[in-house]
């Protein structure tokens, strides 16, 4: 049945294309469009920080030597005593009297039992205050940043681009084979269905802390 | 300049004063107005209601009547929009490429009255005097169709003695929409209710627009409600003098 | 004319009747007015800050135009890429076939319960009902869809389906369905209740369905855009994922997402970016479902593709900007359209999917104000398509005896004859001037005869002038000639 349907559908589509092609010929392959002015690094970082903050996430900046200190301080402030961590997050990020659980094939219940998760990120987008996870170094699998209620994300300043198109172009260039799964995170989860009041945190981490590492 | 006037069927029949005002203003500015008497209608009512085969002869009649003129003016943004935006499509859909060619030649020469004055004739002050409180409703065709921009408002603000008050939420449709006003009368009236409210809030004596068709709808309700507010076409304000 | 196998409308809708009822619902009017005004303002703010917005709209239009010209090529490319990445691709000509495929996949997985990410496409084919017949329970996980499901109602907006419900109504629903008698109507509380209720499902249910916002032919990637996080749950937690996607949702290249992921969030929720977007490709080792199925759905789309003027309808990315700005929708709400797709996009998409004869009132559910065209991120000329579809409706009616004899048809044809000829036109003017005398008081007709009656029921009508413009013109010419 499936093969017949495929042939049928393709035949219908081909006939429809011929019948309904508009008169004017448009070449949509080389489509150019305006882009926002490219910002310098400092401005990018500032805009990124500002826009992430607007989504009601905490944003801080530090130098690479101080990552561990900042992380620990945030965990204490958030009262988060057990954090799940991808296998390849550097050990020297993780200090103090906190239980760090490495994701060595944890069950979903084990992940959900943790207060939060610590990861890095692939790319940041200044224009929209977006963090992109591609499952690469220090990021782990998707379930890790989905089940716990708190996500602490370390973003390298050098990976922050100005615009959305730049982010996609960059991700496209560095994409390994096979292509990974991507998660774009722009603030904590939200809904505005009930009388259009914005209510944070339906599913996924309701608390997001972002630490920008300025010299990395 | 020789300017051919397309009066439009409803202005011809119901609002001749609008046409008279256009003639007077253009003559005052030193132009010669021509009225090709073979004209009837632009075909919009039929075309937009779906009677497109029936509209074609009317469309051809218009193109035939006005092709000879370098400048055509109409005191109706909706009819101007019909010619400039829909005539080409109509010709294409009916596989009449000769007509399409003629439309391409003509369309750019057809102007709505306020855009003729401001953009083509470069005139904003036509020497009008009208000491009344006036507000302005930008009709959908003038705003989003042919995009006359702020031409009408600039013309109004240049009128001596005028007390001009902008309309709140002015870009919202009044609910006329041609046969929509009859086929979907309830929704049309719900939309009109808000437009009337905004007009009354301005405390204006007159509501002005570039289209008598929408003004028929707005004015019809203002009159039914005995609101003490009337409607007038832009040209009828601009023609007023001491 | 095609009889719809899958009915995405409830009956041949009579918009005017549904609208009349809805207009009198004061709560609906209030909710809709407030909601659409809020979304409009948010959209305007994030669009106005982008100087590149117009160029993005043009880019979006051109990319989609290219897709439609080469849809077969891109579908084949997508299929190959998905398969290379370990996914399966199924082709469904219509709703019945799609439902069959999905049902069988779920049965093969041995599941009797599935979780769903909101998908208009699955609403269109009435997947939930088909699954129910097969003894499979489909649980909606979007908060609004959950509300609609519990209320046993239909969605009234493509983005905010429960826009017509207020918090008191929602509390009542949750209290009953989730057994929470002490629940308050605070939005925070209501959301928290939904979260707990659904969490258990996310942790345990093994099969999920979704739709797709975009699919990239070049890479085989599928993209789902959302706010709440339930999408991520459905796309990540289960063993088996089935995505149902209209064939028009394809984009050619990965980089095209750079355009559409700017256009969509700003146009739909009025944000620079929505909270969560997931882009996956086939199956990923150790991360997410181990089995992925993509169901490509036609269900009338190839008919839309074949229509030179109507084809642009397929460019739609389901942002709802047109719905939020429409002055008709704002007042009537979505149910009056009797269709899964309401508002301006619904008025052009539904008649083309099910045949104009089965949705003949929808192309007329518009004053042609054009506000929708102005905000459409892919520049669909909705007024142009509406007028085009009205032409089809009229032509279809005229092909029937009933339609030929209808008063409107006779009247319009008569007027058209008059307007063709100057002499007939002027004669009609004259007789109108004479005939109206009986009805005119002080320059107005307040109770009009015949066709004027529907007008004058609600507002006055200006009387015809005693002297038409052309009569005045001739007289003037005559007087001038006399003078000279």
Image: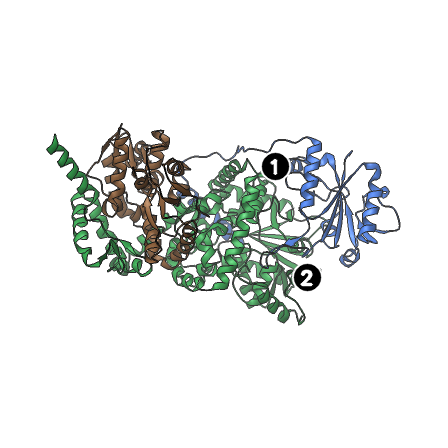
Residue name at image x 21 percent, y 36 percent: B36
Outermost residue on the left side: it is C482
Q: Which residue is mark 2?
A: C192
Q: Which residue is mark 1?
A: A165
Q: Which one is in front in this view, the residue at disc 2 or the one at disc 1?
A: 2
Chain identity of mark 2: C
Q: Is residue C462 left or right of residue C21?
A: left
Above or below, C133 against C326 in this view is: below
Q: Which chain is green?
A: C
x and y percent of residue B93 in the render? Answer: 33, 42
Q: Is residue A99 left or right of residue C430?
A: right
Colouring scheme, one of rainbow, by chain, secondary structure, one colour: by chain
Locate the N terminus of chain C by quadrant: bottom left
For this rendering, which residue is in front, C431 or A102? C431
For this rendering, which residue is in front, C153 or C104? C153
Chain identity of mark 1: A
């Amino acid at each position: 049945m499936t093969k017949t349907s495929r042939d049928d559908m393709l035949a219908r589509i081909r006939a429809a294309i011929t019948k309904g092609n508009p008169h004017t010929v448009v070449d949509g392959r080389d489509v150019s469009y305006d882009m926002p002015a490219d910002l310098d690094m400092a401005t990018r970082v500032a805009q990124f920080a500002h826009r992430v903050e607007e989504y009601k996430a905490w944003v801080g900046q530090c130098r690479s030597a101080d990552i561990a200190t900042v992380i620990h301080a945030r965990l204490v402030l958030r009262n988060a005593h057990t954090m799940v961590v991808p296998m390849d997050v550097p050990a020297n990020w993780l200090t103090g009297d906190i239980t760090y659980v490495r994701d060595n094939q944890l069950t979903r219940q084990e992940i959900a039992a943790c207060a939060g998760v610590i990861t890095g990120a692939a790319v940041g987008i200044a224009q929209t205050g977006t963090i992109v996870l591609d499952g690469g170094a220090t990021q782990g699998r998707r379930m890790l940043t989905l089940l716990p209620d708190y996500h602490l994300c370390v973003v390298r300043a050098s990976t922050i681009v100005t615009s959305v198109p730049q982010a996609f172009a960059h991700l496209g260039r560095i994409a390994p084979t096979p292509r990974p799964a991507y998660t774009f995170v722009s603030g904590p989860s939200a809904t505005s269905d009930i009388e259009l009041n914005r209510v944070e945190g339906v599913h996924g981490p309701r608390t997001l802390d972002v630490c920008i590492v300025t010299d990395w | 300049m020789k300017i051919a006037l397309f009066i439009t069927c409803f202005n011809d029949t119901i609002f001749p004063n609008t046409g008279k005002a256009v003639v007077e203003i253009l003559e005052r500015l030193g132009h010669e107005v021509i009225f090709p008497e073979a004209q009837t209608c632009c075909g919009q009512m039929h075309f937009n209601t779906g009677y497109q085969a029936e509209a074609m002869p009317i469309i051809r009649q218009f193109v035939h009547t006005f092709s000879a003129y370098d400048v055509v003016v109409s005191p109706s943004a909706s009819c101007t929009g019909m010619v400039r935006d829909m005539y080409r499509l109509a010709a294409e859909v009916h596989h009449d490429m000769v007509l399409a060619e003629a439309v391409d030649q003509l369309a750019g020469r057809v102007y709505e009255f306020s855009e003729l004055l401001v953009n083509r004739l470069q005139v904003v002050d036509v020497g009008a005097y009208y000491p009344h409180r006036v507000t302005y409703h930008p009709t959908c065709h003038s705003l989003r169709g042919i995009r006359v921009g702020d031409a009408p408002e600039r013309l109004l603000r240049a009128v001596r003695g005028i007390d001009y008050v902008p309309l709140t939420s002015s870009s919202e449709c009044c609910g006329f929409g041609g046969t929509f006003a009859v086929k979907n009368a309830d929704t049309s009236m719900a939309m009109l209710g808000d437009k009337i409210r905004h007009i009354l809030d301005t405390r204006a004596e007159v509501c002005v627009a570039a289209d008598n068709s929408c003004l028929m709808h707005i004015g019809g309700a203002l009159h039914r409600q005995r609101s003490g507010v009337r409607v007038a076409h832009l040209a009828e304000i601009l023609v007023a003098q001491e | 004319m095609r009889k719809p196998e899958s009915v995405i409308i409830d009956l041949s809708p009579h918009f005017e009747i549904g609208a009349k009822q809805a207009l009198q619902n004061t709560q609906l009017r209030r909710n809709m007015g407030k909601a659409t005004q809020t979304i409009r303002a948010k959209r305007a703010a994030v669009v106005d800050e982008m100087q590149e917005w117009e160029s993005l709209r043009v880019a979006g239009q051109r990319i989609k135009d290219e897709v439609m010209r080469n849809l077969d090529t891109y579908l084949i490319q997508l299929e190959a890429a998905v398969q290379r990445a370990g996914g399966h691709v199924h082709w469904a000509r219509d709703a019945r076939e799609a439902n069959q495929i999905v049902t069988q996949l779920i049965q093969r997985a041995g599941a009797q319960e599935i979780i769903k990410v909101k998908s208009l496409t699955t609403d269109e084919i009435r997947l939930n009902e088909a699954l129910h017949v097969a003894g499979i329970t489909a649980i909606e996980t979007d908060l609004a869809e959950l509300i609609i499901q519990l209320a046993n109602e239909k969605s009234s907006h493509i983005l905010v389906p429960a826009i017509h419900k207020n918090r008191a109504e929602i509390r009542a629903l949750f209290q009953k369905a989730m057994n929470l008698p002490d629940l308050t109507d605070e939005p925070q509380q209501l959301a928290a209740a939904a979260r707990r209720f659904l969490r258990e499902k996310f942790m345990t249910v093994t099969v999920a369905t979704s739709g797709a916002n975009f699919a990239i032919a070049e890479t085989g990637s599928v993209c789902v855009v959302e706010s709440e996080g339930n999408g991520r749950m459905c796309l990540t937690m289960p063993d088996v994922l089935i995505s149902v996607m209209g064939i028009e949702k394809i984009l050619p290249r990965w980089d095209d997402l750079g355009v559409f992921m700017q256009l969509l969030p700003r146009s739909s929720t009025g944000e620079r970016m929505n909270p969560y977007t997931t882009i996956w490709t086939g199956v990923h080792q150790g991360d997410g479902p181990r089995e992925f199925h993509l169901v490509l759905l036609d269900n009338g789309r190839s008919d839309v593709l074949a229509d030179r003027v109507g084809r642009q309808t397929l460019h739609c990315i389901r942002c709802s900007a047109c719905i939020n700005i429409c002055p008709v929708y704002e007042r009537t709400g979505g149910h009056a359209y009797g269709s899964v797709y309401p508002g301006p996009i619904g008025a052009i998409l539904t008649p083309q999917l099910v045949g104009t004869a089965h949705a003949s009132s929808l192309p007329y559910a518009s004053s042609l104000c054009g506000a929708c065209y102005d905000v459409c991120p892919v520049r669909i000329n909705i007024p142009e398509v509406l007028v085009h579809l009205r032409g089809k409706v009229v032509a279809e009616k005229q092909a029937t005896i009933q339609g030929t004899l209808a008063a409107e048809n006779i009247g319009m044809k008569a007027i058209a004859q008059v307007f063709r000829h100057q002499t007939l036109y002027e004669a009609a003017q004259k007789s109108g001037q004479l005939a109206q005398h009986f009805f005119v008081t002080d320059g107005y007709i307040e109770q009009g005869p015949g066709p004027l009656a529907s007008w004058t029921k609600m507002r006055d009508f200006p009387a015809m002038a005693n002297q038409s413009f052309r009569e005045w013109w001739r007289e003037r010419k005559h007087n001038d000639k006399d003078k000279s």
